[in-house]
Image: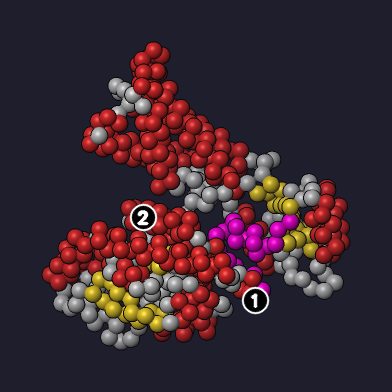
Amino acid sequence: MRVLRLNGRTVLLLFAEAILVFGSIVGAVYLRVGVDDAKFELIDRYGLWKAGLATFFCLAGFYLFDLYDFIVMHDRRELVLRLVQALGLAWIALALCFYFYPGLMLGRSVSLIALPLALALMVGWRVSIHWFLGHPDFGERILIVGSGNSAIEIAREVLSRPDAGYRIVGFVGNDAEQLGKSLINPRVIGLTEHLNDVVKSAHVDRIVVAMGERRGQFPTDKLLQLSLAGHVSIEEGAAFYERITGRVSLAMVRPSWLIFTGPGRKAKYASVSRSIVHRAAALVGALLSLPIVIVTAILIKLDSRGPVFYKQERVGKNGRPFTLIKFRSMRTDAEADGPVWASKGDDRTTRVGRVMRKIRVDEIPQFWNILRGEMSFVGPRPERPHFVAQLAQEIPYYEQRHLIAPGLTGWAQIKYPYGASIEDARQKLQYDLFYIKNHSLVFDALILFETVKIILFGRGAQ
């Protein structure tokens, strides 16, 4: 599950598809009622505004079906299937709107013309775009400076994203014995001492530096010359890795990263405004969910013996412990033998508990933790002190996830499947560190939208 990232290419794609869908609806009006009546429908009866509303529903449907994720959409058959599903969902939602608000409807039978027209245009457009992005002659040509594990890992991530618009021309290193050797697929095509010549001959657009700054081995002068010349973009390897994967590589993290990404004076003001927004949203959520809370409490009492709420100590911001509140979804003797990681298909879960976890109803009482300032809506998942002590010994930089308040949902929760092992915790930490480095209210909103999508499709819950 991936979240929509608003880079320049995604914004351009959104804009182009908005024009296509909007144009399909306007074109359908002309085809259905004729040129003379179309002007009346579109202008006098606010048809353009209605077409804009329908376009919004369609784009929302595309988002729900991951049609803005270039990594997911490799298979053209899958692409067409998702387009049909997304447009179908959008038209069903529009039909409901027309039923309750008939004034929003555009003309007579316009939808019957606009739907196949929009589908045909979108399929043609998307197939063309994906062919263009996946073609070996297009895309930004990348040269990786370095030939170690970090360089290979960066190359592996780029190669796993053929539609991302990057083409690796090769590696350059310091070891002459590696020259011409294939490290993963691209070869070592030169040495750092000939960096300028390699950049010119390979027509490089971007250099990704993935080697340590060892004295006498790092090509400082050559990289400085290329940077000042302005003919090629130069990017540090860890930053490039973060940008394309949405996570921080623990193997590439250096102490300086922790120093220079620490909270500054502006971050304090941003933190206060973020806390206010999250608490206000929690208050609204608590009031709106009150009927669900009452029904859930009754079902829990009818299903099994024990309290309605489950309280457990968790580690919060700056390592301070707090008491997390959830609806009880397990038997009362679930941890009679001590703390145990939850697992997929956990047999300790009650019948009502399985349903609550599937639709995330068990998380609703955490609104109280947010109101108390112990949690935020978005942040790293709060862990128990027992597991924090264990993981901090096994995983470097694990304690850094407590730099901000834990969240009801988070970047790691939506990007990585539910895990119950040290390796899973290591992988999720990389996403947590990325969020800590880049968190903002806009980023929080995107994560919340993605969480809603996960709940609607019933994916990711345990």
Tell me which residue sits at (68%, 62%) in the image: 237
How many labels sit on residues? 2
Callout 2: few (<14), some (14-19), or many (20+) C-alpha neighbours within 10 Å?
Answer: some
Which quadrant is the N terminus positioned in?
bottom left
Position of residue 421 measured from the top left corner of the image (x, y, whole percent)? 45, 75
Q: Nearer the viewer, residue 236 or 187?
A: 236
Tell me which residue sits at (56%, 37%) in the image: 129
Q: Quadrant of residue 330?
A: bottom left
Q: Which residue is mark 2?
A: 452
Q: Which residue is mark 1?
A: 255
Residue type at mark 1 is Pro
Which quadrant is the C terminus positioned in?
bottom left
Residue range in magenta is 234-256
Position of residue 36 measured from the top left corner of the image (x, y, whole percent)? 39, 12
Q: Are marks 2 and 1 in contact (CB under 8 Å)?
A: no
**Looking at the picture, does residue 306 appear above or below residue 34?**
below
Position of residue 426 measured from the top left corner of the image (x, y, whole percent)? 51, 73
Q: Earlier in the sequence, mark 2 or mark 1?
A: 1
Position of residue 379 measured from the top left corner of the image (x, y, whole percent)? 44, 67
Tell me which residue sits at (33%, 24%) in the image: 45
Whether residue 164 can be seen here: yes
Q: Quadrant of residue 336?
A: bottom left
Callout 1: few (<14), some (14-19), or many (20+) C-alpha neighbours within 10 Å?
Answer: few
**Is 422 left, or right, of 7 in this rendering?**
left
Residue extending farthest left:
302
Q: For numbered disc 1, what is the local secondary structure?
A: helix
